Amino acid sequence: MYQQSFDALGGSTAWTALAAVLPLTVTFVLIGAGRLRSHQAVGAGLLGAAAVAAGYGMPPGQVLSAAAEGAAYGLVPLTWIVVNALWIHRMTVDSGHFAVLRRSFAALSADRRVQALVIAFCLGSLLEALAGFGTPVALAAAMLIALGFAPFKAVTLALVANAATAAYGAMGTPVVTLGRVTGLPADELGEVIGRQAPLVTLLVPFVLVWLTDRRRGLREAWEPALVCGVAAGTAQVTASALLPVELVGLVSALTALAAVLVWARLRHRPPVGRRPVPRLIAGGSAQAAQDMLDRARVLARDGWRGALSACLPYLIIVAVFGVAQTPWVHALLHRATVGFPWPGLRLRDWQGGVPAQSVFTLEPLAGGTLLLLAGLVGVAALRIRPGRALRAYRDVLHQLRHSVLTVCGVLAMAYVMGLSGQTAAIGHAVAATGGAMAALAPALGWLGTTVTGSATSANALFGSLQSAAAQATGLPVHLLAAANDAGGSLAKPISPQNLAIAAAVAELHGAEGRIFRSVVLHSAALLALLCLLVYLESTPLLSWLLP
């Protein structure tokens, strides 16, 4: 029986935690330097994690078993989600419906900065609230590319936007998980998160405008960015205080979408200056700019019926996931869930219990399966021939063949680190900082999501640790626990798992390092601001913000 320990290396907690950082350091240095393909960099990180686990005393057989479980989780549900999400998008493109959708967005606004807000932030937030995992990044990036954004710019926008939406993602699953591991009511935690996350929610639209068009974008498109951020942030604060956590993300996304659409309808003015509209931004070409103007002029040819048909696949996704989250349907689907101890794992966590990661949970009627159902309904609704749908599915499988290795490798490394106690060792070292824990609490959640790719997993890993640290230091328990979730969402852009998904969608194979370098500073800057906010909330200066 393997027992996790904070002092596994020579009885030193410092050395134990320092060694645990090695796999992450190796992975991000190799990805960031761009010297290796992503699956090679992740493979090196996995070897590092296995070596550290062996140094901790974990038996080799259990190390292999932990890696196998992580790889299996990479296949189901993550790869299953991405495959079906891209299949739906590919069908709309191949059938010509997405061309109509492009013209509809061009008629709404030919300004790509507004389109980035609508698709990356608003639509991405809606998909995150309903589905989570890699779904919003996959679909938002694909839609931006189809609208004429350069692939690299599109995935950068989709990843950064995801940082503002994951705190209440997947119908509040991260918050519900946090409540379970800490013993605190989920609705109370959600209300505290609603006093932290809106800071990021307010700033991210401005970051998206900056990424799309730099200084000119901020000068000309600050107004829709402000409308979007204020609407989403205000909705988060209000909904987190009045509604169940399962609805906060959904209400915030819909409010932001409605606000931007109303602004685009009533207040939009073409950019000033000498350059034509739309300006050559987001990596677009002169031809792409002219195409967007042409699409806006010929929208009348499509009519509202054509625009509605083009939106139908995405409306079906929202409807399917919305129905699936109603209490009685959710309970019915949940009956198919199967959980079992993963073979070959005999271990205890640092508290003497069974680690949650050692139990493999298979949800056959969730995530990717719901997307598959939505796709089949879309095939029927759009009258797409079965042969065309099958060819689209085959093309998606071919497109993702290299990315599956990266996703499975990332999860294998995460599970080896988690089950051997490396992740907990890092968390324990951070928790030992005493009063400074308030400033570092979001960073712990950020680290957890970086390793696992999931804010839910980060809360499961570090939620109880945050609670224990708060009690030991006299800090508010709700504050630190909530900070773990709010900070965890900010690591979504740099998680190797999401980087692999983004690169696969844009067919930027081997460009994960470049994508990582484009988003890491934004993620780190937002994290620093959140750390400052949480620290101030632990002092009389801003403690009044807490409910």
Image (cartoon, rainbow, N blue to C red):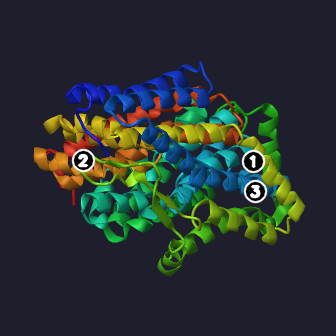
Residue 159 visible (yes or no) = yes
Q: Residue at x 21, y 51 (%)?
A: 467
Q: Tell me the SS state at disc 2.
A: helix
**In what element is the residue under mark 1?**
helix
Q: Residue at x 87, y 61 (%)?
A: 301
The circle drawn on residue 465 is 2
User: Could you tell me how far apart the alpha carbons at marks 3 and 2 are, in whole angstroms?
Assistant: 47 Å
Decide which of tag 2 and tag 1 comes sooner along the chain. 1
Residue 492 visible in the picture: no
Disc nearest the viewer among 3 and 2? 2
* Viewport quadrant of the C terminus: bottom left
Closer to us: 300 or 50: 50
Q: Nearer the viewer, residue 515 or 344?
A: 344
Q: Measured from the top left, where is residue 442 in percent x and y?
A: 31, 42
Within-10-Å neighbours for mark 2: few <14, some 14–19, many 20+:
many
x, y (%) of residue 78? 58, 51
Horizontally, residue 21 falls left or right of residue 215, namely: left
Is 168 situated left or right of 279 in this image? left
Disc 3: which residue = 101
Query: Circle 1: is it few (<14), some (14-19), or many (20+) Cα within 10 Å?
Result: some
Above/below status of 283 relative to 463: above
Q: Amino acid at mark 3?
A: Leu
Residue identifier under label 1: 397
Count the marks: how many?
Answer: 3
> Which amino acid lies under the numbered mark 1 shown in the image of this protein?
Leu
Tell me the quarter of the picture where residue 243 sits.
Answer: bottom left
Cα distance in 3D space between marks 2 and 1: 40 Å
Q: Is residue 28 above or below residue 258?
A: above
